[in-house]
Structure formats: structure tokens, C-alpha cells
């Protein structure tokens, strides 16, 4: 299996692990996958009483040969899950960190 397909399968496996984590009557967890453009998103959509819920939990892209973590609105250290799947921190870009700050982490800069 080539690296790109490994990334795709690993992201899908990661998101599927967490898609059933949040189950509430009026809030749906949606898994959005655009395999053609390599965008992967886990959303929470619905209502908590009178409050509208619509936010991303996880957002990944694959671009320039790396996995870009665009959003992680949890305390889950997803790098550990990805490392267990054979993906090193040097193959992951933390896209929600400013580019100037990325060089100070163990992750890829871009």
C-alpha cells in the first residue's frame, strides 16, 4: 500500500473510532469524507435545548504528502493514535498552529 492510501485509511480508522463516542438524542455526529480532495471532518450538529450546535470536532486534510490536522476540539492526543498506525509526528502538520510556531514542535512544519 502506498503512503497516501495508508494516510487515507488511517484517518478514516481514527475518525470511525470516535464517531460513536458522542451520542445524544438531539445532537448528531457526522463523518464527512471527501476522498477525491482528501478532506476529512467529524462534526457535531443539532440542538442542546435552545442552543444550536454546529461545530467541527476533528478536521484533517492530506496535502503536500503530509497529514494536516486543521482542527482538534478535544483533549485527545491524536498523534498517539496515528503513531500506533505507523505515522510519525514528522508526517503530521498541526495546521491550527501558526506557521512560525510549528518549528518549535516535534511535528512537521509544512
Image: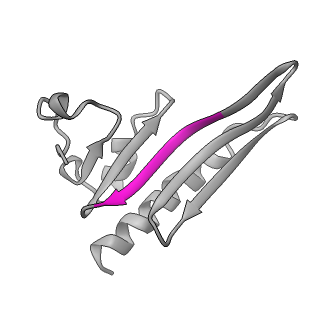
Is any part of residue 61 visible from this angle?
Answer: yes
Q: Position of residue 64 (x, y in %)?
A: 25, 62
62 in relation to 25, above or below: below
Q: Kindly give the residue lying farthest to the top in the view shown.
A: 50
Tell me which residue sits at (25%, 30%) in the image: 98
Front in this rendered view, residue 20 or 3 = 3
Q: Quadrant of residue 106?
A: top left
Q: Which quadrant holds the N terminus?
A: bottom left
Q: Position of residue 18 (x, y in %)?
A: 59, 45
- Image check: 6 left or right of 36? left
Tell me which residue sits at (33%, 71%) in the image: 4
Front in this rendered view, residue 105 or 23 = 105
Q: Position of residue 76 (x, y in %)?
A: 46, 33
76 in relation to 50, above or below: below
Is any part of residue 18 visible from this angle?
Answer: no
Q: Position of residue 25 (x, y in %)?
A: 87, 35
Q: Which residues are magenta?
A: 55-63
Tell me which residue sits at (23%, 52%) in the image: 88
Q: Quadrant of residue 32?
A: bottom right
Q: Quadrant of residue 8?
A: bottom left
Per the picture, the main secondary structure of the magenta-coloured stretch is strand
- Image check: 40 left or right of 95? right
- Image check: 30 left or right of 63? right
- Image check: 56 left or right of 61? right
Front in this rendered view, residue 37 or 27 = 37
Amino acid at each position: 500500500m502506498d503512503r497516501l492510501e495508508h494516510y487515507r485509511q488511517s484517518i478514516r480508522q481514527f475518525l470511525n473510532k470516535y464517531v460513536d463516542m458522542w451520542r445524544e438524542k438531539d445532537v448528531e455526529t457526522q463523518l464527512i469524507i471527501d476522498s477525491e480532495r482528501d478532506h476529512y471532518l467529524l462534526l457535531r450538529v443539532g440542538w442542546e435545548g435552545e442552543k444550536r450546535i454546529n461545530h467541527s470536532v476533528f478536521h484533517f486534510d492530506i496535502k503536500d504528502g503530509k497529514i494536516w490536522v486543521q482542527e482538534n476540539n478535544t483533549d485527545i492526543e491524536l498523534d498517539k493514535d496515528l503513531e500506533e498506525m505507523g505515522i510519525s509526528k514528522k508526517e503530521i502538520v498541526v495546521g491550527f498552529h501558526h506557521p512560525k510556531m510549528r518549528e518549535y514542535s516535534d511535528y512537521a512544519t509544512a
